[in-house]
């Protein structure tokens, strides 16, 4: 079905524009984030927050895709609930209304009447038509019907870095360890029946700053992996002889040490699950390993489709190590996105509970599993 990929890219561009607006305009910078609690909170952080940008971006993506592709309605999922606390402590369901004026009125219910300028700026961005100057996208037919797909949205990945807003974090070996750079918009499509990711868009709203205007400029990447079709805006990176690994700061010393022993240098540390997955797609790292259950379907679906388009993939670490111990020699099964985890509630239904390994070149996956297999035998891996 032609048209879906450009639509995914267009919504990611609109989302990126809203994210940039929230960091650029004084009335929006002053909006306070809401703290997540109970099952909504990610255990990765002591305190977990969402901003109005997270909720509004998710709703605009749902709205725009559902309007263009009615077959997708009811199958567009995302990290956030559409509820946001209003100025009085009540809840408002955030959505894109029929007219900009109605959206302003709804946003004012969340923000309070004194925030008219903020509400207007946001509504204007949400209702704006996005035109893509990317004609290459129009000719791409992934050969799959929207009626067979589901969507996972992470409206802003690395919300903590988005809120912190550090602008001038120097990259180490090409990888930004933290800061705004790691805040990304992730939109992925998976096959409703098999759960395999087939289309992915990663948008970097804060890729670089224009030296003249100092405004942030973004960029995006896309991938298609369906049947025998493999298409990507990126070229497959050249493999290093020994894999360089990127890790979360939350990873244990044992895991860091085992992966450092692969010979590709000490693991690089970076914020943002999506950003680390992107680093692998860009070839800045050969593998992203996560031994903790702190990512979710919305974090990995879009980058996973791009990694598949490049010839790689994302596997569950725990399952891959188990298969390796059992002497499995075949391909390691990859993460799927269509079925909630039985017995779990809330976001935990969609957690990548067995951790993950993301790679482009299968020999790197095997090297990582061999290094961590020994740790697992020593009982030093969580789970
Ligand atoms: C988070 C975000 C964090 C990541 C965590 C994700 O998503 O990407 O940065 O932790 O796993 O769930 P880390 O930075 O240690 O990799 P969000 O910001 O959307 O909650
Ligand atoms: Ca996320
Ligand atoms: Ca998020």
Image (cartoon, grey):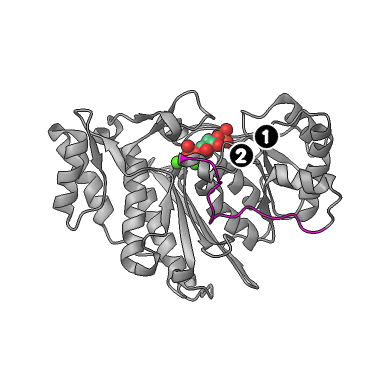
Residue carrying label 1: 268
**Residue span colored magenta:** 330-345
To which quarter of the image does residue 376 belong? top right
**Residue drawn at (73%, 30%) of the image:** 256
- Tell me where residue 51 appears, x and y as whole percent: 35, 36
- Tell me where residue 161 appears, x and y as whole percent: 47, 33
Sequence-first disc among 1 and 2: 2
Q: Is residue 258 above or below residue 353?
A: above
State yes or no: residue 334 in magenta: yes
**Quarter of the image where ligand 3 sits:** top left
Main secondary structure of the magenta stretch: loop
Q: Ligand 1 closer than 8 Å to the CB at disc 2?
A: no
- The number of callouts visible is 2
Label 1: state its secondary structure. strand
Q: Residue furthest right?
A: 327
Residue carrying label 2: 175
Contact (Cβ within 8 Å) of mark 1 with mark 2: yes
Q: Is residue 321 above or below residue 136?
A: above
**Residue drawn at (44%, 69%) of the image:** 146
Q: State left or right for residue 183 relative to residue 319.
A: left
User: Can see residue 317?
Assistant: yes
To which quarter of the image does residue 87 belong? top left
Label 2 Cα neighbours within 10 Å, binned few <14 / some 14-19 / many ≥20: many
Q: State left or right for residue 242 relative to residue 7.
A: right
Q: Is residue 217 above or below residue 188?
A: above
Label 2: state its secondary structure. loop
**Residue drawn at (63%, 52%) of the image:** 335
Which disc, if any, is residue 159? none
> Closer to the camera, 276 or 299?
299
């Amino acid at each position: 079905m032609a048209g879906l990929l450009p639509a995914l890219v267009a919504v990611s561009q609109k989302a990126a524009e809203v994210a940039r607006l929230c960091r650029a305009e004084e009335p929006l910078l002053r909006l306070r984030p809401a703290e997540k609690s109970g099952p909504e909170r990610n255990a990765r952080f002591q305190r977990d927050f969402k901003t109005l940008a997270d909720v509004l971006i998710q709703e605009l993506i749902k709205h725009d895709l559902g309007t263009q592709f009615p077959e997708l309605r009811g199958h567009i999922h995302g990290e956030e609930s559409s509820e946001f606390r209003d100025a009085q402590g009540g809840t408002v369901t955030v959505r894109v209304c029929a007219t900009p004026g109605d959206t302003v009125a709804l946003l004012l219910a969340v923000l309070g009447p004194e925030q008219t300028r903020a509400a207007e700026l946001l509504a204007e961005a949400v209702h704006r038509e996005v035109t893509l100057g990317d004609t290459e996208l129009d000719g791409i037919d992934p050969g799959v019907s929207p009626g067979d797909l589901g969507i996972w949205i992470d409206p802003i990945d690395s919300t903590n870095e988005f809120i912190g807003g550090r602008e001038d974090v120097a990259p180490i070996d090409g990888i930004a360890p933290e800061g705004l750079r790691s805040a990304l918009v992730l939109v992925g499509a998976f096959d409703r029946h098999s759960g395999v990711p087939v289309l992915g868009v990663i948008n970097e709203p804060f890729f670089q700053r224009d030296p003249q205007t100092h405004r942030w400029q973004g960029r995006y990447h896309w991938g298609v992996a369906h049947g025998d079709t493999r298409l990507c805006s990126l070229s497959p990176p050249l493999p290093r002889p020994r894999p360089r690994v990127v890790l979360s700061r939350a990873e244990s010393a044992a895991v860091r040490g085992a992966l450092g022993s692969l010979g590709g240098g000490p693991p690089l540390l970076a914020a943002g699950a999506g950003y680390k997955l992107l680093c692998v797609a860009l070839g800045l790292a050969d593998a992203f390993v996560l031994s903790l259950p702190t990512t979710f379907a919305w974090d990995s679906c879009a980058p996973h489709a791009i990694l598949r388009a490049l010839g790689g993939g994302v596997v569950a670490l725990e399952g891959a190590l188990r298969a390796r111990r059992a002497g499995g020699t075949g391909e390691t099964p990859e993460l799927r996105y269509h079925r909630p985890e039985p017995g779990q509630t809330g976001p935990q239904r969609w957690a990548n509970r067995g951790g993950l390994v993301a790679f482009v070149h299968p020999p790197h996956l095997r090297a990582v599993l061999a290094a961590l297999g020994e740790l697992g035998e020593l009982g030093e891996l969580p789970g």
